[in-house]
Amino acid sequence: MGIYNIPDRQYREMSGISQSRTKRLLNSGLAYLAPPPAKSDAFRVGDLIDQMCLTPETVDDNFIIPPDYANCAGNVTGTGARSTSKNTAYVKEKMADFGRTHVGKQFISKEEWMMCREIANQVTEKKFFKSFSDDKSSETQVAMDGEINGLLCKGLADGMSNSILFDLKTTRDSSIKEFRRSFFKFGYGFQLRWYWELAVANGMEIALDQCYIIAAGKQDPVDVVVFRVPVEWLEKAKDDIDVCLERYKRYKEFAFNVGQDEGSDWIWLNQDQVEVQFNV
């Protein structure tokens, strides 16, 4: 049990169940076992904004803008005609070579980079973020592990100090009406309460009413809004966490082997057919 300042990759290797998988149990055990979704363009853009704001020192290690091969003189069609298409053999070959040279980095377009930089600048210029950054107890990308309801859990909070906890969300629309929909649709309260539980398990004394979300809206014009999350919503989120962890315990015992966190390499043969009903 502890609080760590470690790279994202090391956090992924930590033992413990994460909130992102656990909240799938609000739907079913099969949802828990489903593979994670492929990373979308929106995820990639959000990841860059997160790093620009929270860990700017990692941006150059993880992202790069490829050259504009489509507009190079060598980009021609099969008949030798000049082309600006990104789908020619020339561009594909150049991009493949570029990818081999920059293994592990995510490609981002110049336009995407400029949009992310504009949003990140707005985030870091917010009074809330400046006050947080000036607090000597503040940390970003805070990895934690500890017990929740008797189970070893882990989490990676975007920002935490001795007095506040926050998460940074890139969103299509940061207006209060639209973001409130996103809050419930994507279970942001579940996520924040999970981090708060881990912080408390590690001796932090953050008041429950000091949980925030920085909503970085990609709408035009860009708008960044800091939302304070109502305590009653976080209390409801704890009810959902309790349900999910109880289901985790019971599914693990009766319905299937949840082997990802325990090094097991077997599963129940009927796991795709069994759905255990719980009155919790």
Image: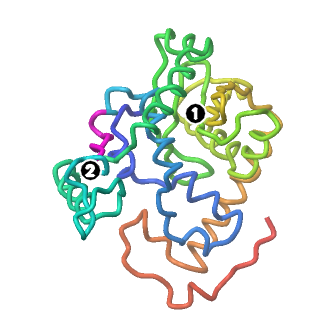
Quadrant including the C terminus: bottom right
Name the one closer to the observer, 163 or 146: 163
Q: Nearer the viewer, residue 199 or 7?
A: 7
The x, y position of residue 29, in whole percent, is 63, 72
Under circle 1, the secondary element is strand
- Within 10 Å of disc 2 (Cα), the crowding (few <14, some 14-19, many 20+) is few
**In the rendered image, which residue does mark 1 sit on?**
168
Q: Nearer the viewer, residue 16 or 223?
A: 223
Query: Left of 58 or right of it: where is 230?
Result: right
Q: To which quarter of the image does residue 91 belong?
A: bottom left
Where does residue 269 sit, x and y in percent of width and height?
50, 90
Residue 104, label in figure:
2
Amino acid carrying mark 1 in the image: Leu
Examine the structure image and report whether residue 1 is included in the region drawn in magenta. Answer: no
**Is residue 160 placed above or below 270 in the rendered structure?**
above
Residues drawn in magenta? 60-68
Q: Give the mark toward the camera: 2 or 1.
A: 2
